[in-house]
Structures are given as structure tokens and as C-alpha cells.
């Protein structure tokens, strides 16, 4: 851990203690860092979540008001415009696409078998074009579609899938524990926890990287955690980034097959789905060419939406370090006008994520007052279109305003604790990087502890904006509200969370409530401030922990620069 070991003088031999006393001071104690104001946080939430802001949909008048408000508050906080072009924004061009595929036709020699849209498969394209077609593209069963150097795992093993269409399974390869085959091997793909290799977004990205023309994921309800109807929902209008390359680097066709369709397709190739699936959970598995081809077209109707990330900058005070960066992220967007409940059709998104945005603003104001001023530059990045698939942060990751290899870490704030003080803080993916050590140290000074999230198999770490930094190698911290409320019964947290999930989540009633108590959020905010400040002052860069799936990406990124 990189926090000064000189803090615990009592534990050191006298000589060493004397040496330590003459060293530069350790990290500034929490007690000397400024407290954040719950009143300021609440006032910002009320503003951003007001009906005037119309639920902050990307491209709406609500966006215009939100961008103005955030820029103005950053300015008042004493920040500088965060874009090197002198503005407070980074333009994020979005495109909303509705895809209409033809049936998928699989051919083996002279035999053709069509598969039905929606009932048996769904497909779309990230290419920003009116139509994509794949014709007689060779089909390959590619297991879990994973290349994971840290687990010595490669489902392709040199098989060239350029121009081909790959069929892959959902989730991480479920490798059994050699000592107890009923359990998963905790040393492979996080055991029960999901790694990024298990997310469907990874499968699509890997297919693109390998040059596959098409990629179809086999849907199974149990491992996916949701039914086919949810997958069918993804066939509705989808937002994408309108990147300058029109996303032509992606596979032409991305989609899902039902398990029944996949079973039938593989049977046509003389293969057994369950047998292949069992083989795919072993490291010896190698992708299997099926001796068949796939043909399919997708017609697309599109509308463009111009949106923006908002960014403020607190330049570092140390000339040698000011071109190194620590970033706070919080998405400002929500769903705008939505399905009415009791005549109210504005999804205000007070908790999701006016609250995180407000906490970030307050951290910016307080960071400006810390003495000595931070050595490295702090960036406050409020991103758009999180609700449409983390698009604003993806755009920043693809087109960073400051080099990612000079970006030490990211603290993301998506939702806050609104129910009072807790004796703990939940960290999603706890143990991922050294940032968690900074958090543990700050929590200890608050007499609090860190806890992992309760459902690591759901892969929450991969579902908010910090993740777009993690996948580029930048260590990223993903906190969630604590669960042990001081002076409240043990089931209080679960009860309140369930209430929110069932009643308010992504609904017009996500508004500021009379019973909110931001005392806990204020402590969390101060802890986040401490992490950012201490990383900005630190002697070394935070790193991913050994075995983490992003460590090799970071090493490669930093190595290139050496
Ligand atoms: Zn949301």
C-alpha cells in the first residue's frame, strides 16, 4: 500500500521513527480535510432534479439547462474550463438506431435453414449505415469467446475468424474447482464473481478486435440472469456513439440466439450443444469451424442526437506533476420525459444521478480550498448518456482530452446514500486496485470499514461510467452506499433499497424525498475527496492488483510510453 508507513510511529523501532520524523509528512489527515456541505448537495440535487430540467434527457432542453448549470457551478467553484479548447464541454455525437433484420439463413452445402427474427434471434449493427449484409459468412463456435492472458485462456488459439461469424456463450467460462467439482475454481475468472470476460459487451468487442463479421451470443436465462424478453427489448431503438469512423471497426452484425436456436443450428453441423458447452469450460478448448455459413441483412433507421460531457479542471500546483490527472466522474443524464405515473411524465432522476452530480460539484468546491493545493490536476467530468449504455464516458475513453496513461485514477459517483450515516462503505469490485487501499485508509480514519458488494456475480463493476476507464487500463473506484446504518435495524438498508428499486428506479417518482438524510453521503463525499487529493499528492501511480483483468492493459499502456 502506498500510504506512508510512517503514520504508525509506535510500531517502529526508535531509530526508524526518528528517520521518519524528518521525512515529508504523510497524507493529510481526514480531520484536516474540509467537510462537505449537505445543504449545498441538497440544493444542487433539487435544481438538477426539478421539473424545469425535464429529466435531463440527452439532446433535450433539459440538457441545455444542465450543461449551463454545471458549467456555471464549476466556474463559481474556481475551476477552469476542462476542455483544452477553452470550453466547459466535450461534444458527444450520438445516433439512435432502429434495426430491422431479415431472417438469419444458415446453409450447409445445398441445405438452407432460416431462423426467425425475435423468436429465435435478434440482431443489430453498430455501423452507422442504412444497411449491413453478411453473405455466406463461415460459422465458428468459439466457446466463451475469451482471450484472458492472466488465466492463460484463449478460446481461439490462433484460429483466424476474420470475415466469419462466431457463436459464443454468455458469462465467464465456468471452470470447476479441481478439489470440489461442484464449486467454481476461485482462481479462474473470479470464481462466483463475474469478470469482464463474462459481460456481453466484451464478447462483441473481442469479435470486432478479431475481425469477425458477425457475432451471436447464445442466450440462456439462468447464467444471463434475465429472460429472453429482456434480450428482445434490446432490439428496440438503441443509442450508439456516432464515432468519426461510423463504428466500422465493429463487427457488421451483433446479436443473440436463443438456446433452442443454437442447439438446432449446431445439430445441423453434426454437433451437440451441451457437449460443446462442456468442452468450452476447459482450457484446452479451441474454436470449432462448423462447415456452414450464415447470411443476413439488417436495415437501419437512424436519428442523430448532439450531446455533451461537461468538464471542469483544477490545475495542479506542482509544475512537474500538473500534466498528470485524477478524474471524478458522475453522469448528469437521465430519461427525460417518460411513461407517466399518476399524470407525472418527468423522470427527474433525483437519486439517479442528480445526487452523484451534486456530490461531485461539492467535492470540486471543497477541493479548491484544500491547502496545500493538489500537486496534480483534478478533472471533474460529468458525462452524458450513461442510461443509454455508458456512452459519454465511452466517448471520453476513446477521445480523451488528457492522456489516459497520465491519468492516475478515476472515482465514479453514481447515486449516493440518502438514508443517514453508515459504519461502512460498499466498494463494488473491492480489491481491484490500490485505490481501494486509499479508500480503506480514509474509511479507517472515519472509524468506518469497507465491504464488497453482495452480488459480485452480477458484474456491477462493469455497469457504470468508471468502467470505460478501467477497460482502457486506468484504475477506477466504484463506491456504493454502505449497508450498516448507525442506530437502525440490520435489515434497514435492504428495506430502503427494495423500496427504491420497486417504486422509484427509472420512474417519475425518483425525486427528493422528505425523509432524506444526507449525513452519510457527506461522509462518503469526504472520503472520495480524500482519495482524489491523496492520489494527486502521491509518490507513485495507483496500480491494479495482481490477477485483475485490467492490469495487463495498464502495463501495456504505460510500457508504450516508457
Ligand atoms: Zn439509471
Image: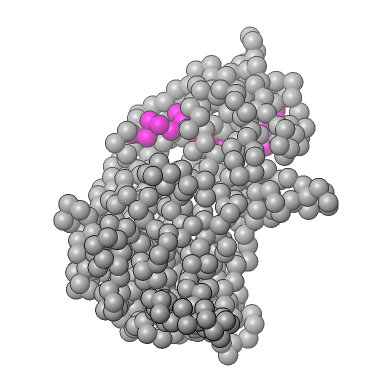
Identify the residue at image location x=51%, y=29%: 210
Q: Is residue 558 left or right of residue 16?
A: left
Nearest the eye: 403 or 485: 403
Is residue 412 highlighted in magenta?
A: no
Find residue 338 and report its horizontal and vertical position in percent. 38, 59
Q: In the rendered view, would you say 478 is above or below 123?
A: below
Find residue 532 and report its horizontal and vertical position in percent. 38, 68
Q: Is residue 164 left or right of residue 374?
A: right
In the rendered image, which quarter is residue 139 located in? top right
Identify the residue at image location x=60%, y=56%: 458
Identify the residue at image location x=38%, y=26%: 131
Q: In the rendered view, would you say 48 is above or below 492?
A: above
Find residue 123 and report its horizontal and vertical position in percent. 50, 34
Find residue 549 and report its horizontal and vertical position in percent. 56, 49
Q: Which residues, given as a range, are shown in magenta?
A: 246-265
Nearest the eye: 206 or 114: 206
Amino acid at each position: 500500500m502506498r500510504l506512508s508507513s510512517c503514520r504508525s510511529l509506535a510500531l517502529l523501532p526508535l531509530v526508524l521513527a526518528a528517520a521518519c520524523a524528518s521525512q515529508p509528512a504523510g497524507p493529510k489527515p481526514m480531520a484536516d480535510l474540509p467537510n462537505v456541505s449537505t445543504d449545498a448537495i441538497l440544493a444542487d440535487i433539487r435544481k438538477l432534479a426539478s421539473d424545469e430540467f425535464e429529466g435531463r434527457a440527452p439532446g433535450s432542453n433539459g440538457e441545455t439547462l444542465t450543461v449551463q448549470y454545471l458549467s456555471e457551478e464549476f466556474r463559481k467553484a474556481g475551476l477552469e474550463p476542462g476542455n483544452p479548447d477553452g470550453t466547459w464541454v466535450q461534444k458527444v455525437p450520438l445516433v439512435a438506431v432502429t434495426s430491422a433484420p431479415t431472417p438469419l439463413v444458415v446453409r450447409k452445402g445445398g441445405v438452407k435453414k432460416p431462423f426467425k427474427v425475435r423468436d429465435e434471434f435478434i440482431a443489430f449493427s453498430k455501423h452507422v449505415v442504412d444497411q449491413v449484409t453478411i453473405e455466406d459468412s463461415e460459422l465458428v463456435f468459439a466457446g466463451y469467446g475469451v482471450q484472458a492472458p492472466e488465466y492463460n485462456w484463449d478460446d481461439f488459439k490462433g484460429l483466424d475468424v476474420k470475415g466469419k461469424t462466431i457463436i459464443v456463450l454468455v458469462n465467464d467460462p465456468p471452470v470447476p474447482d479441481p478439489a470440489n467439482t461442484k464449486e467454481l475454481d476461485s482462481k479462474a475468472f473470479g470464481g462466483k464473481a463475474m469478470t469482464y470476460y463474462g459481460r456481453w459487451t466484451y464478447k462483441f468487442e473481442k469479435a470486432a478486435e478479431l475481425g469477425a463479421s458477425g457475432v451471436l451470443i447464445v442466450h440462456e436465462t439462468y447464467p444471463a440472469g434475465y429472460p429472453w424478453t429482456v434480450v428482445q427489448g434490446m432490439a428496440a431503438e438503441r443509442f450508439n456513439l456516432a464515432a468519426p469512423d461510423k463504428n466500422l471497426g465493429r463487427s457488421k452484425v451483433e446479436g443473440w440466439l436463443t438456446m433452442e436456436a443454437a442447439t438446432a443450428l449446431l445439430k445441423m453441423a453434426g454437433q451437440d450443444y451441451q457437449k460443446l458447452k462442456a468442452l468450452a469450460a476447459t482450457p484446452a478448448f479451441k474454436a470449432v469451424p462448423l462447415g456452414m455459413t450464415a447470411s443476413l441483412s439488417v436495415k437501419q433507421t437512424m436519428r442523430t442526437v448532439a450531446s455533451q460531457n461537461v468538464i471542469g479542471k483544477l490545475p495542479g500546483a506542482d509544475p512537474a506533476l500538473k500534466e498528470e490527472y485524477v478524474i471524478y466522474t458522475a453522469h448528469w443524464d437521465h430519461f427525460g420525459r417518460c411513461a407517466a405515473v399518476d399524470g407525472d411524465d418527468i423522470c427527474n432522476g433525483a437519486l439517479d444521478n442528480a445526487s452523484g452530480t451534486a456530490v461531485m460539484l461539492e467535492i470540486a468546491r471543497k477541493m479548491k480550498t484544500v491547502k496545500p493545493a493538489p500537486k496534480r490536476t483534478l478533472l471533474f467530468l460529468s458525462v452524458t448518456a450513461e442510461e443509454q449504455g455508458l456512452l459519454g464516458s465511452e466517448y471520453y475513453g476513446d477521445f480523451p482530452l488528457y492522456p489516459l496513461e497520465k491519468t492516475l485514477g478515476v472515482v465514479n459517483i453514481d447515486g449516493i446514500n440518502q438514508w443517514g450515516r453508515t459504519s461502512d462503505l460498499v466498494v463494488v469490485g473491492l480489491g481491484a486496485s490500490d485505490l481501494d487501499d486509499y479508500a480503506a485508509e480514509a474509511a479507517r480514519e472515519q472509524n468506518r470499514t469497507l465491504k464488497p458488494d453482495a452480488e459480485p456475480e452480477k458484474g456491477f463493476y462493469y455497469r457504470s461510467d468508471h468502467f470505460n476507464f478501467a477497460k482502457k487500463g486506468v484504475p477506477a473506484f466504484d463506491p456504493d452506499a454502505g449497508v450498516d446504518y448507525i442506530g437502525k435495524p440490520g435489515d434497514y438498508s435492504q428495506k430502503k433499497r427494495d423500496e427504491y428499486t420497486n417504486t422509484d428506479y427509472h420512474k417519475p417518482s425518483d425525486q427528493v424525498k422528505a425523509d432524506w438524510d444526507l449525513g452519510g453521503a457527506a461522509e462518503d463525499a469526504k472520503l472520495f475527496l480524500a482519495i482524489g487529493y491523496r492520489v494527486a499528492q502521491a509518490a507513485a501511480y495507483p496500480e491494479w492488483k495482481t490477477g485483475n483483468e485490467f492490469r495487463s492493459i495498464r502495463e501495456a499502456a504505460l510500457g508504450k510510453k516508457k
